[in-house]
Image (cartoon, helix red, strand yellow):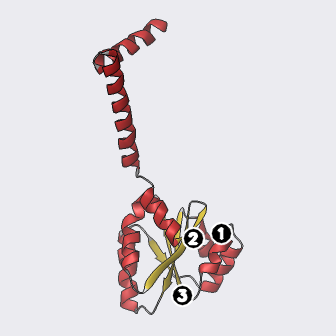
Amino acid sequence: MIWDQCQDYIKKPIMLLLQVNNMDASGQKEFKHRLQSLGLRIKYPKPGILCKVLRQSQYKSLAEAIIGPTYVAVSKQTPQELQAALHYIAEQRKIFLVAGKVASYVLSYEGLREVVYSTPSEVATKAMIATTLMSTALEISRSTNQPASALFGLSLGASQRTV
């Protein structure tokens, strides 16, 4: 049963490995609840079983990161949605993010931070595209000395005539 659970962990889009250093039970409970509110589920697999599962998978390099008690944090979120969770983990003095995977990529702590913080969100990507399109339309409008609405009407009329 534990073996199957560990195999399910590596199938999740995001899996983080966290090392625990002398945290009491109440601290662990608080940590678990806080991460759940941020979209991560925390699991406490037996390190030996988790290592064996990882070694038999495409993520065998993650097995080297498991030394002693290890939490596994899994999520179905996008990397951008994990910014608050990574910030919270970074503030902890007794828990350390050592490695993880996003999609099929195995990443170190530094790699995870780069993926989470440098990849723009969907909203930011749409905003960048809209800005680019608007600036291009304004430049065309200026160069042809016609308002953008007139250009749209011209292109619409041209496409209707060819149909």
User: Looking at numbered disc 3 in the image, what kind of residue is underneath it?
Assistant: Pro
From the viewer's perspective, tell me whether residue 50 is left or right of residue 127. Answer: right
First along the sequence among labels 1 and 3: 1
Residue found at the far right of this picture: 56
Please rate how many residues cluster around mark 2, counting C-alpha atoms within 10 Å: few if below 14, some from 14 to 19, many from 20.
many
Q: State the residue lying farthest toward the front.
A: 143
Can residue 1 be seen from the camera position used here? no
Q: Is residue 28 above or below residue 118?
A: below
- Which residue is located at x 42 percent, y 52 percent? 120
Residues 24 and 6: in front is 24
Say which quadrant the N terminus sits in. bottom right
Residue 157 position within the rendered picture, expressed as x and y whole percent measured from the top left:
39, 10
- Whole-percent x, y for residue 103 in the image: 57, 60
The answer to whether 140 is drawn above or below residue 15 in the figure is above
Residue on which the image places disc 3: 69
Residue type, label 2: Tyr
What whole-number distance in Å separates the C-alpha atoms at marks 1 and 2?
A: 11 Å
Residue 116 percent location from the top left of the image: 45, 61
**Where is mark 1, residue-wise?**
59
Inter-mark Cα distance, 3 to 2: 16 Å
Q: Which mark is residue 9?
A: 2
Q: Residue furthest top?
A: 161
